[in-house]
């Protein structure tokens, strides 16, 4: 439990009349910030937070440069106060799924297909009229209380954007999720992140998400003047909510589970938590699962079904961050493809196929350092993906 979380009345979900919550266009060119709230309909917090920022900026004393566009994600589910109707709208953003949707006749659409079509049009239009770099921020909340955190792809631009937020940033988690909205827009040249702001109906979660939008707006230069007080207050709030956890952590491995594993997480872990070497983390049909060394437990599974027991992670030190940035500036990530036994995938430039023997010698940590955060094994050997940068 997060002791810093205030206990008070739950927030009242708003029922926005339309998808576009608001749009502010500056006279001066500048960055575009697309803020999405309530991609999951049972998470009203993001929509409320976005509305608060729009209301503040509508006073006119803090002019926008570029454009701020705020959108409700799963509008129908938000009105029905449920997570989704037919399927999870935040798992539909693979290239294949979007292509399928585009060729599908409209009368075959389910509720989320309709939502996704409208979102595609809204965000594509924002990208088309952009007069600077485009940023997409996706605001979420969680069923359990916990420390807010940022999930982002491991590209230099995204690291820089996330570094402005004094919350824990988890690298390598987005890569484990198939079809997340943020990775789709990253592949289209936007800088993106998602944030989990706290428990669904806690007022403190709305404050946190609002603070994330202010800090982001400040960091990208969307509002050059007039928001200083809000940004400072927001930085303090987010720093406090981090509760002493590291600023950057990386997923080392995913503890995948099946029903036959009879996996039970040890009670007491927060959504992000430290664990020391040898500490009992969970039990399954084979016995105890203990921490291999000092590290971090990320998203332990306590309720509902799922295939992720937990993610095992570690703090990404400032030195490791700098080393990684330097190696990539020097092109080591590209040079990896020249090694004997390594081939670039013919269909995807950001994917490497590493043959069996080399795959066993090459430490996973090296691949992670170079931004290859999703590593799986198939009949060809190791298949390592990274996000385009
Ligand atoms: Zn969500």
Image (spheres, rainbow, N blue to C red):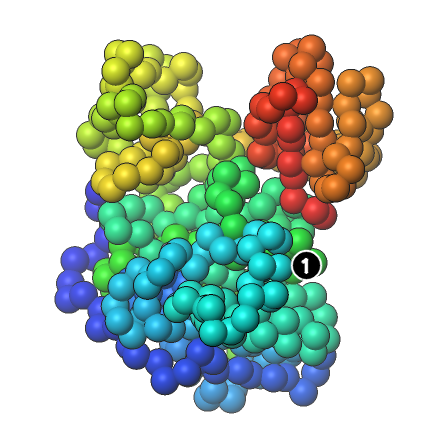
Res. 348 visible in picture: yes
For disc 1, the marked residue is 188
Q: What residue lies at 74% left-to-right and 41% top-to-bottom?
A: 347
Residue 172, percent from left and from top: 53, 37
* Helix, strand or loop for disc 1: loop
Mark 1 is surrounded, within 10 Å at the Cα level, by few (under 14), some (14 to 19) or many (20 or more) other residues, namely few
Image check: 257 left or right of 382? left
Q: What residue lies at 62% left-to-right and 59% top-to-bottom?
A: 99
* Along the viewing direction, whichever of 355 and 166 lies nearer the viewer: 355
User: Which quarter of the figure has residue 63?
Assistant: bottom right
Q: What residue lies at 70% left-to-right and 36% top-to-bottom?
A: 351
Residue 325, percent from left and from top: 70, 37
* Along the viewing direction, whichever of 51 and 176 lies nearer the viewer: 176
In the image, residue 155 above or below residue 293: below
User: Which quarter of the figure has residue 245?
Assistant: top left
* Along the viewing direction, whichever of 182 and 163 lies nearer the viewer: 182
Q: Quadrant of the N terminus?
A: top left
Image check: 91 left or right of 346? left
Q: What residue lies at 31% left-to-right and 34% top-to-bottom?
A: 300
Q: Is mark 1 within 8 Å of ligand 1?
A: no
* Along the viewing direction, whichever of 320 and 368 lies nearer the viewer: 368
| Total numbered badges shown on the rendered structure | 1
In the image, residue 130 above or below residue 336: below
Residue 51, percent from left and from top: 40, 77
User: Which quarter of the figure has residue 207?
Assistant: bottom left
Residue 180, percent from left and from top: 50, 52
In the image, residue 170 above or below residue 205: above
Res. 217 visible in picture: no
């Amino acid at each position: 439990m997060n002791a810093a979380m205030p206990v008070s009345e739950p927030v009242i979900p708003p029922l926005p009349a339309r998808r576009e919550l608001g749009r502010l266009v500056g006279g001066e060119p500048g960055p575009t910030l697309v803020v999405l709230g309530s991609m999951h309909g049972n998470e009203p917090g993001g929509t409320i937070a976005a509305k608060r920022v729009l209301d503040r900026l509508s006073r006119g004393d803090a002019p926008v440069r570029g454009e701020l566009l705020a959108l409700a994600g799963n509008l129908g589910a938000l009105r029905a106060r449920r997570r989704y109707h037919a399927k999870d709208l935040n798992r539909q953003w693979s290239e294949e799924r979007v292509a399928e949707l585009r060729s599908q006749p409209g009368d075959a659409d389910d509720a989320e297909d309709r939502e996704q079509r409208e979102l595609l049009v809204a965000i594509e239009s924002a990208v088309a009229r952009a007069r600077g770099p485009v940023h997409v921020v996706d605001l979420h909340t969680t069923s359990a209380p916990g420390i807010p955190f940022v999930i982002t792809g491991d590209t230099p631009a995204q690291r820089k954007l996330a570094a402005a937020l004094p919350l824990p940033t988890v690298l390598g988690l987005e890569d484990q999720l198939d079809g997340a909205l943020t990775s789709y827009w990253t592949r289209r040249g936007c800088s993106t992140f998602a944030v989990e702001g706290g428990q669904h109906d806690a007022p403190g979660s709305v404050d946190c998400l609002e603070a994330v939008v202010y800090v982001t707006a400040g960091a990208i230069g969307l509002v050059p003047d007039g928001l200083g007080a809000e940004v400072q207050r927001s930085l303090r709030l987010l720093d406090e909510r981090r509760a002493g956890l590291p600023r950057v952590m990386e997923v080392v491995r995913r503890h995948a589970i099946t029903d036959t594993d009879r996996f039970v997480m040890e009670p007491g872990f927060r959504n992000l938590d430290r664990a020391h070497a040898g500490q009992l983390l969970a039990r399954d049909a084979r016995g105890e699962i203990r921490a291999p060394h000092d590290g971090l437990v990320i998203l332990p599974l306590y309720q509902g079904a799922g295939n992720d027991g937990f993610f095992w992670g570690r703090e990404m030190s400032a030195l490791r961050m700098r080393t990684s940035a330097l190696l990539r500036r020097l092109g080591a990530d590209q040079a990896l493809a020249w090694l004997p036994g390594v081939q670039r995938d013919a269909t995807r430039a950001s994917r490497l196929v590493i043959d069996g023997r080399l795959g066993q010698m090459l430490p996973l940590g090296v691949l992670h350092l170079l931004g290859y955060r999703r590593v799986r094994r198939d009949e060809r050997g190791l298949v390592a993906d990274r996000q385009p940068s």
